[in-house]
Image (cartoon, coloured by chain):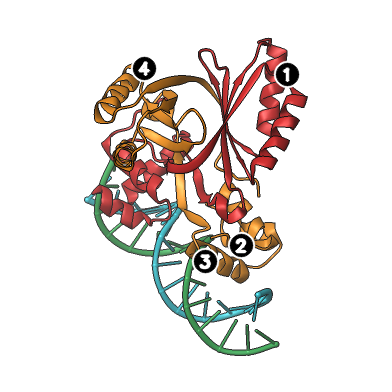
Chain colours: A red, B orange, C cyan, D green
Amino acid sequence: MAARLDDLDRKILRALQSDAGQSLDEIARKVGSSKTPVWNRVRKMREAGVMGPPQVVVDPDALGLEACFFVLIRTSEHETEWQARFLAALKARPEVQEAHRLAGEIDYILKVRVANARAYDEFYQALISEVRVFNVTALLSMEEIKSSLALPI
Amino acid sequence: MAARLDDLDRKILRALQSDAGQSLDEIARKVGSSKTPVWNRVRKMREAGVMGPPQVVVDPDALGLEACFFVLIRTSEHETEWQARFLAALKARPEVQEAHRLAGEIDYILKVRVANARAYDEFYQALISEVRVFNVTALLSMEEIKSSLALPI
DNA sequence: CCTGAAATGGTTTGTAG
DNA sequence: CTACAAACCATTTCAGG
């Protein structure tokens, strides 16, 4: 799936991932090209899945979601059936913004956004009642120093 | 900064955060309203900082960024001067997609996207040469189970 | 605050180099 | 593959309920 991207493609991605609201003319000017080539490349990259649809990032505080936890999970169960249930549970829960399966001692890490510590506990209780886990450590974020969708291109 | 958002505002945010490429007509239809009120609310929420500018999410694999690490950092230094240097270093590094200051034993967590393990090591070496840290644990992601900007609204 | 329409400007398509 | 132009469609503004 690693489409061949030339320098112009990369410049376009750089412009779009910082602000997708720009007009084609603006982007063309920034990347040193013209409207049609930019449009053709954008179209191609969208079809190839190189970039997703434009999204707006909503400020969690504005919605009262003031607590962010990173959750480290160890489990003793590694059967496919258990894993399938666990993954389904994570995907179904909107509080879970990110979930990764890890290499090493810790099996999973989650990023969870909730209103407060109490809401986290409700999430936690609901999760462990759905699937058995061996050990859970929650790390509470005090300050979001950086949060960037932008990849180094 | 917690602006009062009514039900219609929330519906609009829900629609926009899943796909900001929709036309105002489509959104208006989905939320059961009309073009002008939707437009006025979008405008107001943008000005209030409730939502950021539209962004496209780029597929890391398409750029050859195939490794994702979560980095747990402990430090013994907690002076403001050290902290300022550390924060500046994190913000300056494009590999760092997220950085949080934590409560508890672990002081910081980072999410780092790089091409491979070797690129991570280069990042790591560069970071610890800039600022002194006590202990660093890197968790390598094997599989991105879920990654969603969408907040539960 | 909503409706509906008018004007502006950007996107998308098509033709030609 | 690029430049240019024409048609289309969305956004933005504005008058009226």
Q: Which residue is mark 1?
A: A132
- What residue appears at the point 66 percent right and 38 percent down from the top-left corner? A120
Classify mark 4: residues with Cα within 10 Å, few (<14), some (14-19) or many (20+).
Answer: some
- What residue appears at the point 45 percent right and 32 percent down from the top-left corner? B107
Lower sequence index among marks 4 and 3 = 3
* Residue type at tag 3: Arg
Distance in Å between CA atoms under marks 1 and 4: 32 Å
Chain identifier of the residue bearing label 4 in the image: B
* Residue type at tag 2: Asp
Give the percent coordinates (x, y) of residue A123.
70, 35
Please identify the residue farthest to the right as the structure is shown.
A129
Distance in Å between CA atoms under marks 3 and 1: 46 Å
Is residue B117 in view from this perspective?
A: yes
Task: Determine which of the numbered discs, if any, sits on residue B45 in the image.
Answer: none
Q: In terms of secondary structure, where does tag 1 sit? A: loop
- Depth check: give the residue in front, B104 or C13: B104
* Residue type at tag 4: Ala
Q: In terms of secondary structure, where does tag 2 sit? A: helix
